[in-house]
Amino acid sequence: MITIENTTSAGQTITLDEKHFVNCHLKNCTLFYSGGDFLLTNTTVENCPVNLSGPAQRTVALLFSMGVLKPGAFPGIPSAPGSPQAPVQ
């Protein structure tokens, strides 16, 4: 896992998998997550949409199909793959 410390990122594209952010600020970034390990320690995330793929997207789809998560519960995260709101991958 890569540790990223004491940084401010604005308007960047960031993959969360296999990263540990410590004392960071992420603002207006596009975040990508596919299910790998990551940590956010004393890190703020401001106005950063999250794009899911792979195992992360399938886990969210499962939780929506079971009713554990409700549509609209997480802005920017589609309710289920294949739904009108979900991006085609």
Image (spheres, grey):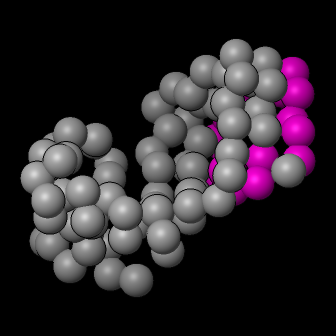
Whether residue 78 appears in this view of the structure is: no
Q: Quadrant of residue 26?
A: top right
Q: Is residue 14 magenta?
A: yes
At x 59%, y 42%, the residue is: 29
Taking the image as drawn, is residue 16 in sight? yes
- The residue sitting at 14% across, 64% down in the picture is 65
Quadrant where the C terminus lies?
Answer: bottom left
Judge left or right: residue 16 versus residue 18: left
Judging depth in this view, the residue of 79 and 67 nearest the camera is 67
Vertical comparison of 31 with 9: above or below: below
Residue 43 placed where, x, y %? 68, 22
In the picture, measured across the screen, residue 28 lies left or right of residue 23, that is left
| Horizontal side of residue 71 vs 54, given as left or right | left
Residue 77 vs 6, above or below: the answer is: below
Taking depth in this image into account, of 53 and 38 the one nearest to the observer is 38
- Up-down relation of residue 74 to residue 37 (above or below): above
Q: Examine the residues drawn in magenta and state their main secondary structure.
A: strand
Give the quadrant of residue 17: bottom right
Task: Looking at the picture, tell me which residue is in the foreground, 10 or 32.
Answer: 32
Q: Residue at position x 20%, y 39% from top?
A: 73
Q: Which residues are magenta?
A: 2-19
Percent of width and height locating residue 75: 28, 42
Please tell me which residue is depicted at 32% across the width and 53% down the height of the picture: 77
